[in-house]
Image: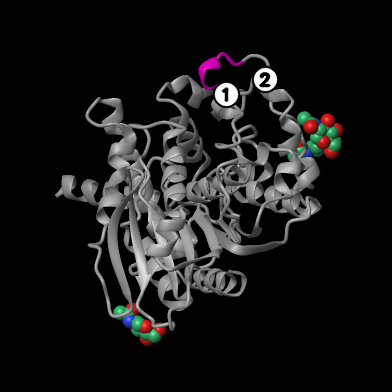
Amino acid sequence: MGSKVIFLLLTGALTAYYIYSPIPDGVEEKWKLMLADSFFRSLSHLADFTELVGLKDYMGVMMFITFAERVPLSTDNNVTVTESVFNGVEVVVYEPHRHSNGELRRAVIYLHGGGWCLGSSRMGPYDLLARRIANELNAVVVSVEYRLAPAHHFPVQFDDVYGAVKHFLKDATLAQYSVDVKRIAVSGDSAGGNLAAALAQQLQQDPEQQVELKAQALLYPALQTLDLNTPSYQQNAHMPILPRTLMVRFWSEYFTTDKSLYEAMMTNSHNSLESSHLLKFVNWSVFLPETYRLRYNYTAPSTGSSDNSKTISAITDPRASPLLVEDAQLKVLPRAYIMTCEYDVLRDDGIMYATRLRRAGVQVTHEHYKGGFHGAMMFTVWPTDFQIGHRMLNNYIGWLDENL
Ligand SMILES: *[C@@H]1O[C@H](CO)[C@@H](O)[C@H](O)[C@H]1NC(C)=O
Ligand SMILES: *[C@@H]1O[C@H](CO)[C@@H](O)[C@H](O)[C@H]1NC(C)=O
Ligand SMILES: *[C@@H]1O[C@H](CO)[C@@H](O)[C@H](O)[C@H]1NC(C)=O
């Protein structure tokens, strides 16, 4: 009897510990988020454990979510779905059936999130998103299955995306899919938003490239790794879905498996003298509105002591941190939609990019969700579907429809 009671008490306490996490009242459907988050945190603890005892690396265990959410690719009444290979990179192509009297169609290149380490075009929410865009916009959607860390580090993820997109943008490929060269957008969420922003910049700099993108839609993107103590990193360090520890882990594993970078990034001491002249591009005391600055005092990240010399060039590379370019490289960019969430470590990356793009003269639609949390737009499938996710998805598709 006694042991049963103790067991019940322990289970109860553990369950309460796992499920209860201090989530601000401003977050919508707070209890549902706590439940969803308790699952993620349990998996993360398990992953820490298996890595510690040498069974399986952390990301290998976290990939469980990616596999669990995988859906078979299937053609439906409205959209034909095919797997293809563009320049050696796997892609999934969604083509709408709608007849359009031989008119050319719009296209959206979509890059999934998952911190460059997780995720897949084939996950239910991404599949649903691509189908909706294809069907509702009568657009071709190309979802790129780029390779992931820790098996592959930067710039493999970016290069995969870039290579696939260059193939898609060739005259012959666009003709094959009946795509209007003047109506192509790039989009992505989180790490995919990072890749999308970097892609838009690099295409502009590429002398071989003639196609101009019409739009870029960045959903709670990661845009810089120099300052991992912006007010949003501080405010939301323990928020569900993407706590600061996990984001820092994603950044460091994007670059290297060497744990010393993770340690340095956790204390925001990973910069070197080489990055000091770039800090002005991520100076949040200049690029954030007062409401977000007020409660925090700006201190620049320390420079000079880091010995991660191998990774320094990656840290300062605009293909990894699109915020690190001059205004001259921003002003030539296509119009932008930037979605940010209040309770997200990446909030300030998105806000700073919106500010910088606007000041450079780019047309920007910045949609901020006051009750939003990181990743919310992908929480649209039962049992983890959130009203805010559906609203975001509708607003995002609406913007694409009007601006592409
Ligand atoms: C096909 O499109 C129509 C009209 O948009 C929609 O009502 C229907 O649900 C779609 N079917 C599928 C399988 O998505
Ligand atoms: C950041 O901006 C403030 C002014 O708001 C300035 O005093 C400071 O030197 C800047 N720091 C960097 C690293 O650009
Ligand atoms: C910011 O600096 C002011 C003046 O030095 C100080 O009173 C305040 O406590 C500081 N705020 C934070 C959040 O550190």
Which residue is tagged 1? 313
Looking at the image, which residue is at 50% across and 55% down?
188
The amino acid at mark 1 is Ser
Report x, y in % for residue 121.
Answer: 35, 55
What are the residue bounds of the magenta stretch? 306-312
Who is closer to the viewer here, 180 or 400? Answer: 180
Where residue 151 appears, as percent x and y from the top left, is 33, 32
Please report the residue visible at 57 percent of the width from the left and 22 percent of the height from the top. Answer: 312
Question: Is the residue marked by circle 2 packed among few (<14), some (14-19), or many (20+) residues within 10 Å?
Answer: some
Whether residue 26 is visible, yes or no, is no
- Looking at the picture, does residue 304 appear above or below residue 70? above
Please name the residue shown 47% across and 44% down the image. Answer: 162
Q: Is residue 286 above or below residue 240?
A: above
Looking at this view, is 242 or 112 the one in front? 112
Q: Secondary structure at mark 1?
A: helix
Position in image of residue 402 (x %, y %): 61, 74
